[in-house]
């Protein structure tokens, strides 16, 4: 019966299943890739299953991966406590989980995240100041990267709401707008596929934001401080073993930083949230 409940839970995106119906021995890892990717649930399970297995051995309890494709599901999972662990690329959600809902910081991924302001290589725009008055394209306003980019440009004396800005559902659409001359300036995440391929692409970076914690992992109230420390010890040394390096490669991060908790706590203030 419990296996049937879990199958339904995964298929429906963990919707409306009360905590009491979960196996008491199991923990749930809520994973969100924000607006930067289009993975389905099965591919997310495959990508993060190895990491969850490592956590299971450390915590001595089965860790089940659940994909929070929509921000509303991620938010609900945090507020209700359905997610015992949260690993979210949109760093503001783990930050709020720590500030408002009793979660503890565990680690963030390496390297940190940034907002890149990019233009086509043949663009006459060479500086951020010259980008004013151009046609901008960026991820939707609810996305973390939109918030990070907005805060960074605010710090540089630019108000995005006063610019000609178009928003797109996923970051992958930003290059499309630039390629087809629908926009002159794009905002992308440093960890997006577009940014990773900049050396081979037709885009040029005119500005990089300050760095902020990327892909934080936080633990809910059910996880003890001792367990958090055990997870931190495990994650910070993954690069030292072949199995750990395989997990890092699959998750597509270079490693984990267990010292960035204070920076994550300061993030929301910087964002103006």
Image (cartoon, rainbow, N blue to C red):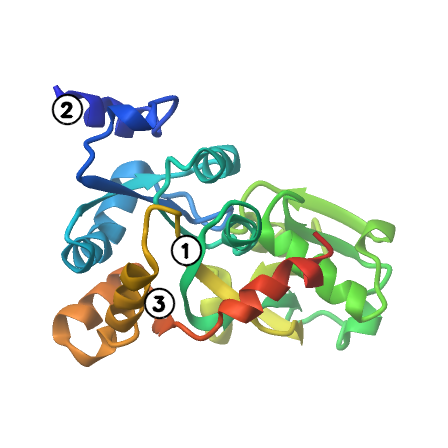
Residue matched to label 2: 2
Which of pointers 3 and 1 lies earlier in the amino acid sequence? 1
State which mark lies toward you, 3 or 1. Answer: 1
Name the element at disc 3.
Answer: loop
Whether 74 is drawn above or below 177: the answer is above
Mark 2 to mark 3 CA distance (whole Å): 33 Å
Taking the image as shown, residue 163 lies to the left or right of residue 270, namely right
Give the farthest residue toward the bottom.
240
Residue drawn at the location 39% of the way across and 47% of the way down: 221
Circle 3 packing at 10 Å, graded few (<14), some (14-19), many (20+), is: some
Residue at disc 2, secondary structure: helix
Q: Mark 1 falls on what kind of element? A: strand
In this view, the residue in front, 19 or 123, is 19
- Left or right of residue 8, residue 106 in this image: right
Residue 185 visible to the viewer: no
Please tell me in which quadrant of the rendered image residue 81 appears.
Answer: top left
Confirm whether residue 52 shows in the render.
yes
Disc 3 and disc 1 in contact, CB within 8 angstroms: no
Q: Which mark is residue 253?
A: 3
């Amino acid at each position: 019966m419990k296996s049937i409940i879990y199958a339904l839970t995964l298929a429906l995106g963990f919707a409306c299943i009360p905590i009491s119906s979960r196996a008491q021995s199991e923990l749930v890892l809520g994973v969100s890739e924000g607006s930067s990717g289009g993975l389905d649930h099965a591919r997310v399970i495959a990508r993060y299953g190895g990491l969850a297995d490592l956590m299971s051995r450390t915590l001595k309890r089965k860790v089940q991966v659940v994909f929070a494709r929509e921000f509303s599901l991620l938010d609900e999972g945090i507020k209700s406590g359905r997610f015992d662990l949260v690993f979210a690329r949109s760093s503001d959600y783990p930050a709020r989980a720590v500030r408002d809902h009793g979660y503890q910081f565990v680690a963030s991924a390496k390297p940190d995240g940034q907002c890149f302001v990019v233009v086509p290589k043949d663009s006459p725009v060479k500086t951020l100041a010259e980008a004013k008055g151009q046609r901008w394209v960026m991820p939707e306003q609810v996305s973390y990267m939109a918030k990070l980019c907005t805060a960074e440009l605010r710090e540089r004396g630019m108000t995005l709401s006063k610019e000609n800005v178009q928003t797109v559902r996923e970051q992958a659409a930003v290059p499309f707008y630039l390629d087809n001359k629908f926009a002159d300036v794009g905002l992308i995440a440093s960890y997006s596929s577009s940014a990773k391929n900049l050396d081979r692409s037709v885009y040029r970076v005119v500005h990089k934001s300050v760095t902020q914690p990327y892909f934080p992992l936080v633990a809910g109230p059910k996880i003890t401080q001792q367990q958090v420390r055990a997870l931190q010890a495990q994650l910070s040394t993954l690069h030292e073993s072949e199995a750990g390096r395989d997990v890092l490669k699959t998750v597509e991060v270079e490693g984990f930083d267990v010292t960035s908790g204070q920076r994550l706590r300061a993030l929301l203030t910087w964002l103006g949230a």
